[in-house]
Each structure stands twice: as C-alpha cells, then as structure tokens.
Amino acid sequence: ILNVEQSPQSLHVQEGDSTNFTCSFPSSNFYALHWYRWETAKSPEALFVMTLNGDEKKKGRISATLNTKEGYSYLYIKGSQPEDSATYLCAFNHAHGNNRLAFGKGNQVVVIP
Amino acid sequence: NAGVTQTPKFRVLKTGQSMTLLCAQDMNHEYMYWYRQDPGMGLRLIHYSVGEGTTAKGEVPDGYNVSRLKKQNFLLGLESAAPSQTSVYFCASSWRDDGVGNQPQHFGDGTRLSIL
C-alpha cells in the first residue's frame, strides 16, 4: 500500500487570501502525480498531472509544483474565492502500464466570504 | 457527451442480497476503475481494467467481482452484500498510458450504497 499524505486535512481561508497545502508521496519509483478538485455533491475533476521533477503547472489562480526527489508537491491558491471551496485530492502513480493511482485523504478548503 | 455515467445513484440493500453497479463511458477510454470512498479515508481502488475482457485486483478487492465485456462498460458486483460494504462507489476511466504518465482519470458522480 502506497502512503500518500496530504496536509493540512482541512483549512479555512478568508476570501482574498492565498493559501497552499502539501502532498507527500514515496520518492522511489515515481511515475506521475495527479491533483483533482472535488466539490461537494459532484465528482472529482482533474486539475493537473505532473511527471517531471521541477514541474510547475497553473490553471487560473491555482498552481502546483513537484519535487520527485524529496517526494512532495505543493498546491497553491492565490486570492481565494468562495468558488474555490472544495476538497483537493492528490494521487500518486508509481508504475506505468495501468495508470493506477493511490489517493491521499484530501485537503478540504473552505473559503469564508 | 455524458462522460462517465453510473447507475444507480442510490441503493439500499439487505445483508446477503446481491446487486450490480453499472459504469458506462462514452469517451472510448481503454482503462476503467472502481473505487470506494469511506469517511476519513482516501479513494481506495477495488478493481480495474486495462481493456475489454481484462480485469485486475486493486487495493480492496475482497467481496467484489467485476466484468468488462464491452469496452464502454465496467460492472461491479456484490454477490452477498455486507454492512462493511456500505460506501460511496466511484467509477473512473482514462486513456491508455502513453508512456509519459500524463493521463488524468475521469470520474462518474458516484453511487451511494447502504447495506442494512
């Protein structure tokens, strides 16, 4: 069983503030790191898939970085808005051939207007 | 496009009953997955399939069976439901791994299953 840890588990952010959270994963046998956004009563939606050490990806006010050597990824939200309230899932893919993912428990973000 | 469709959305079963959850995708994806989501835990992989006619065990396969007779459908079966199988079940699909590892998974809306 692959251990994917996300911290903090939950956080409240004031509207307009920026925030970030961490996903840590095994640094050996790295293949890909996924981030998903999961709103309440909806299905998870892919944000980023990162494969190279040093990767940085951005989608609007959300961005992510990847360090495969030390086994962590950061997700940043700049200028949080209420619509950013969601659970952000990190998932680790350690082997090619089946796109099989090991998920963390998620970072639950609540943006307070 | 409907994407990934799960049927049913809700179901209540009695212990010992059987049922089948259906997942259908219209994106021509080769890979399909079944997960369960329980409070305080991440999504856990039950079974997956890398192509029509093939299935494989995931992290928590016990008590479940699957079939992939058609590329677009992935069925999850509970032969004799147990209260421990009360959960929210998610199906997902993706393109085949292209050797670069950059294929996201696309999820259905989930099936909420309660076993009494």
Image (cartoon, coloured by chain):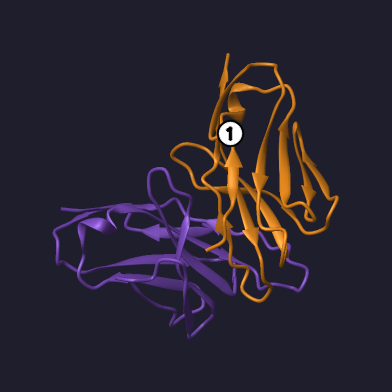
* Rendering coords of residue B40 (x, y %): 42, 43
| Location of residue B96 with respect to A28 vertically, above or below | below
Which residue lies at the image location 54% right of the left edge and 66% below the top edge?
B26
Tell me the residue that label 1 is attached to: A8
Query: Does A73 sit left or right of B7 as displayed?
Result: right
| Location of residue A9 with respect to B8 vertically, above or below | above
* Rendering coords of residue B32 (x, y %): 52, 69
The chain letter corresponding to orange is: A
| Location of residue B6 with respect to A105 vertically, above or below | below
Identify the residue at the far bottom of this view: B53
Tell me the colour chain B is drawn in: purple
Q: Label 1: how many residues lie within 10 Å, few (<14), some (14-19) or many (20+)?
A: some
* Label 1 secondary element: loop
Give A105 or B10, whichever is nearer the viewer.
A105
Which residue lies at the image location 70% right of the left edge and 18% below the top edge?
A17
Q: Quadrant of residue B16?
A: bottom left
Amino acid under disc 1: Pro
Chain letter of mark 1 equals A
Viewer can see residue B1: no
Query: Does B44 sit left or right of B84 as displayed?
Result: right
* Rendering coords of residue B71 (x, y %): 51, 78
Viewer can see residue A44: yes
* Rendering coords of residue A97 (x, y %): 66, 76
Which residue lies at the image location 26% right of the left edge and 57% below the top edge?
B84
Query: Does A24 sit left or right of B16 as displayed?
Result: right
Which residue lies at the image location 44% right of the left edge and 48% below the top edge?
B41
